[in-house]
Amino acid sequence: MLSTKKQLQMPIKSYLAHPHSGKKEALIQEILNLENCEVIPAKNEELLVVVTDTSDDIADKKLTEQIEAIDSLKLLALVSGFNTPINK
């Protein structure tokens, strides 16, 4: 019998997020309010590392759009992205 498992892609990406001046804490809170995001703030810079982990490319695109729409965000730069196959 042939396996009918379906392989899906699970996008995992990391970004550098630069807040507007004086808005680092606000940006942290706004990103933490989104699902599938982790934030690692730099201790000596106005900079955040944001890691996203979504179920598929559609969810990834939607999440990226939500992050880019945050008012306290000045710049979002993709550092690394890859798809991890998951079996279903």
Image: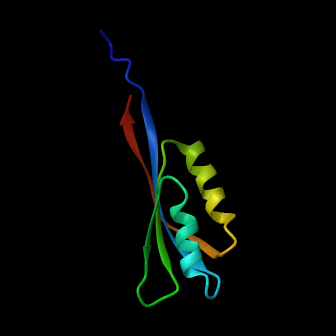
Answer left or right for 13 relative to 18.
left
The one nearer the camera, 46 or 75, is 46
Task: Provide residue 66's location: percent of width, then percent of height.
Answer: 64, 58
Q: Residue at x 54, y 60 (%)?
A: 33
In the figure, residue 18 lies in which quadrant? bottom right
For residue 80, above or below residue 24: above
x and y, in percent, of residue 2 in the image:
33, 13
Name the residue at the bottom extreme.
44
Quarter that holds the N terminus = top left
In the image, is residue 46 above or below residue 71?
below
Residue sticking out furthest to the left: 1
Find residue 57 and report its image quarter: top right
Q: How many marks?
A: 0
Query: Which colouring convention does the figure follow?
Result: rainbow
Work out whether 46 lies above or below 52: below
**Looking at the picture, how far across and down is residue 59, in whole percent?**
57, 45
As displayed, is residue 45 above or below residue 83? below
Q: Residue at x 61, y 82 (%)?
A: 23
Q: Is residue 10 left or right of residue 64?
A: left
Residue visible at 70% across and 72% down in the picture: 71
Q: Quadrant of the C terminus?
A: top left
